[in-house]
Amino acid sequence: MEMLNREEICIIVDSSTNNSNYKILNWSLVNYADHLIGYLGDHLKLTVEIEENNAKQELQYFVKCTPLYDSWKIEYMKKVPFFEKEFRMLSSLFTQFNQAGGYKRWCPRPLYIKENLFVFEDLAVLGYKMPNQEFLTYNETIAVAEAIAKFHAQSYIYEEKKSKQLGRPYRIWEDYSEYLQEPTLGSDWRDTGRNAVIDYLKVFSKYKDLPNFERHVETIITKLYEDVWTLMKPSIKYRNVVLHRDIWKNNILLKTLANGTVHAMIVDYQTVLYCSGMLDLSSFIYFNTNKNFRHNYLRNVQDHYYDILSRELNNVGIDISTVYSDKSVMLDSYEESLLFGLTQSGIIVPISAMGQNKTEELFCNPETSATINTVSRSQEFIQIARENSNYENRVTDILDEMLERYVPNLNLFK
């Protein structure tokens, strides 16, 4: 079956070139890379050969489509609407956001969108790369925090504009609630991740030898993962935004500019929610930084996010006080969001920290993907930690912090 026809190729080329006086000679689709880029979609490189002004030229694009070969992913994506979420964002809501050009942007430019396939400009051609190290540097973290603030600002700007048009308060939830909540189906992936957290803590937690640890840890962790569902719904206390909620390194693209600063773009909007923006900031920080970084620089990152959000809103005549009455309110919201940041990291970090080869071996192998995604992944994580002390330290730091923050003085284990 042809994934893109000639008419669609023309639309893509028209969207990316200024000159309509060209002839399409040929086009091809191949795997974008020989390694894993994302989990819930396939990624292809579209190359289009054109002739323009008697000269041949190759244009390159990035294509994301529904899974083509992995049977578990194909069935899973039929069950949960993650691809449909992103389709609705790209084809409808985001078209109404003000996406500035150049280095003011926060996401790549979509060129052609249909329900099972999205075509974007290829950011690699423009010099962007995924982070190739376990933790982001300070400049990279600041750059991503800026992109998050620009993205969040668009929700507030759109809501204020619609409110004026309608003559009443308007919220995005009115029109897009169907696509901005967690699917009720497909929770087995999260449950499997939660169970792995429990099993891992029983083996590696520095508190594992406390009396009654094993008896209580399962109840405590299960309750934390149940409590976080409230945070994943629209807040009645804070202004809500369209939330990415999965800003780990494979969804970040970075470019170092000539002046040494870093510009970041965020990709992959298939797990969007509508809730407090601090869920994005806290989970991003826990996904991509270590404990020492957070101790030294967390406030810098928070301040930069606030400053950029203020600037973006002020540029269109909106005062930051319509979102946060003052910065302390944002910081309070951040503290309340940490339950999401830590529990989500408890699911994501054990996967992201294991390395590209091991991730592909376990999660992209048709023989193992169904089991490790929805039945159990505990023993795999435990075995990697036994073999790799860096992995053990990285994962244990996150999971023990969950206990330290949410079990007062660890008295429940005594």
Image (cartoon, rainbow, N blue to C red):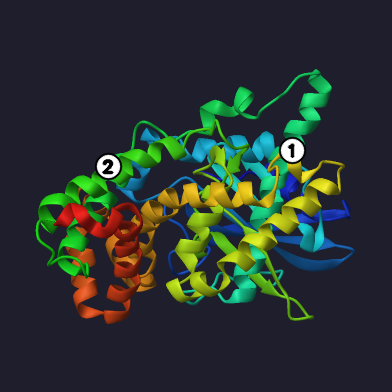
Q: Is residue 75 above or below residue 345?
A: above
The residue sitting at 57% across, 63% down in the picture is: 252
For the question of whether residue 244 can be seen, the reply is no
Give the image quarter of residue 224: top left
Q: Dot 2: what SS? A: helix
Q: Nearer the viewer, residue 381 or 51?
A: 381
Is 155 left, or right, of 335 in this rendering? Answer: right
How packed mark 2 is, by other alpha carbons closer than 10 Å (few <14, some 14-19, many 20 or more), is: few
Q: CA distance from mark 1 to mark 2?
A: 34 Å
The label number, if any, that marks residue 223 in the structure image? 2
For residue 267, the mark is none
In primary-sequence order, the first of circles 1 and 2 is 2
Q: Position of residue 167 (x, y in %)?
A: 81, 18
Label 1 crowd bin: few (<14), some (14–19), many (20+), radius 10 Å: few
349 or 369: nearer the viewer: 349
Quadrant of the rendered structure where residue 395 is?
Answer: bottom left
Q: Residue at x 27, y 54 (%)?
A: 369
Residue flagged by tag 2: what amino acid is it?
A: Lys
> Which residue matches tag 1?
322
| Residue 208 coordinates in the image, percent (x, y) | 16, 65
Residue contact between numbered discs 1 and 2, judged by CB atoms under 8 Å: no
User: Would residue 271 appear left or right of 79 to someone viewing this image?
Assistant: right
Residue at the spot 45% in from the left edge and 69% down from the top edge = 34
Residue type for callout 1 = Thr
In terms of secondary structure, where does tag 1 sit? helix
Q: Position of residue 336 (x, y in %)?
A: 48, 47
Residue 157 in the image: state x and y as whole percent.
76, 39
Which quadrant is home to the C terminus?
Answer: bottom left
For residue 2, say whether it is visible: yes
Q: Residue at x 55, y 27 (%)?
A: 177
Residue 152, compared with residue 284, is above or below; it is above
